[in-house]
Each structure stands twice: as structure tokens, then as C-alpha cells.
Image (spheres, rainbow, N blue to C red):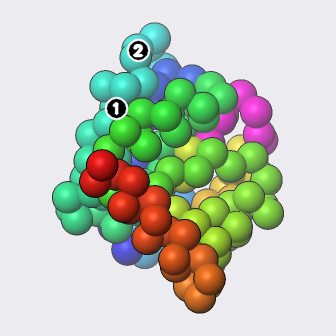
Amino acid sequence: MKIALGTDHAGYEYKERIKRYLTEQGHEVEDFGTHSAESCDYPDFIYPAAHAVAQGACDRAIVLGGSGNGETIVANKVRGVRCAVCWNEDLARLSRAHNDANAMSIGARTVSLEMALKMVEIWLETPFDGGRHAERVHKIAELESR
């Protein structure tokens, strides 16, 4: 799977560790930055990562920041992206199983690195349940076309 990564300064260290984990697991990674812990603006890095998913250049995106909230907002501005902010294992699983989330946002100031890595693992391994959830995801896509 090809995974897009994007973060601001607050998530830089987690991004680097997640990138290493993904590579070790055999995934291809496209890193949209940032490339240091210097203060920066998250939209500059989150939007390109989400756009890569929407365009089909990447299968999914993992975006990071301090809380993960602003990053989720930016990613969800991209048509075709369903980004869920996650802070525990259940949310990571449900975002895939029920929402077919193709992007996940993590707040580096809200969860431990160990939890972040566990959520990434669960999120990548969880399939979409389909069924009654498919109609809901379809309705989300219809809203984007309005």
C-alpha cells in the first residue's frame, strides 16, 4: 500500500517514526513534510497529502499535528477524502470498518507514540465492513457533489 504522510512541526517526530514503521511493514511512503520540527503551518503539508489520495497517487494518508483536529479539517476539504481523527484503538478500527476512512489524523500531543503506532497498525489492517455502512459512505460522496 502507498501511504501519504503530512504533518506540521508538532507531529514531525511521530511522522518520522511512523514512516519508519510503514517502511518496515513493506508499505511505500510519500512524505509531504514537514521535514523538521521548525514551526510551520499544517495546511501546507496536509492538503498535498490528502490530494494525493483523492487523485489516486496514494492509497491512504496519515496526517499529524498537535491535536489532529485542524489536520482533519484540512484533509476533509479535499473531495473524496474521508479523514477521521483518532485517539484510541476503537476509533482507528471504526473509522475504517464503518466509514471507509482513507485518511487518519493523529494528535501527537494527545496520544503516546506507542498508541499512535498501534492505531496505524489497526487502521491499515481493518477492512471496510460495507453493508449498511456502504450506503452512508455513498451519501457522504453525494454531499461532496452539491
Verify whether residue 109 appears in magenta. Answer: yes
- The answer to whether residue 15 of the structure is visible from this angle is no
Image x and y of residue 85, in percent: 63, 45
Q: Are marks 1 and 2 in contact (CB under 8 Å)?
A: yes
Specify whether 94 is left or right of 79.
right
Q: Is residue 9 above or below residue 110?
A: above
Specify whether 60 is left or right of 92.
left
Q: Amino acid at mark 1?
A: Phe
Q: Is residue 23 above or below residue 85?
A: below
Crowd around label 2: few <14 · some 14–19 · many ≥20 (10 Å) = some
Label 2: element kind: loop
Specify whether 45 is left or right of 62.
left
Residue at 70% x, 67% y is 94
Label located before the other in sequence (1 or 2)? 2
**Residue annotated with mark 1:** 45
Image x and y of residue 40, in percent: 40, 14
Residue at 50% x, 51% y is 83
Q: Is 103 in front, or is 141?
A: 141
Residue at 48% x, 43% y is 63
Q: Amino acid at mark 2?
A: Cys
Q: Is 121 in front, or is 57?
A: 57
Image x and y of residue 74, in percent: 42, 33
Q: Is 87 in front, or is 143?
A: 143
**Residue annotated with mark 2:** 40
Magenta span dominant secondary structure: loop
Residue at 79% x, 63% y is 90
Magenta-drawn segment: 106-112
* Quadrant in the rendering for residue 45: top left
Label 1: element kind: helix
Q: Is 56 in front, or is 110?
A: 56
Cα gap from disc 1 to disc 2, whole angstroms: 9 Å
Image x and y of residue 66, in percent: 62, 25
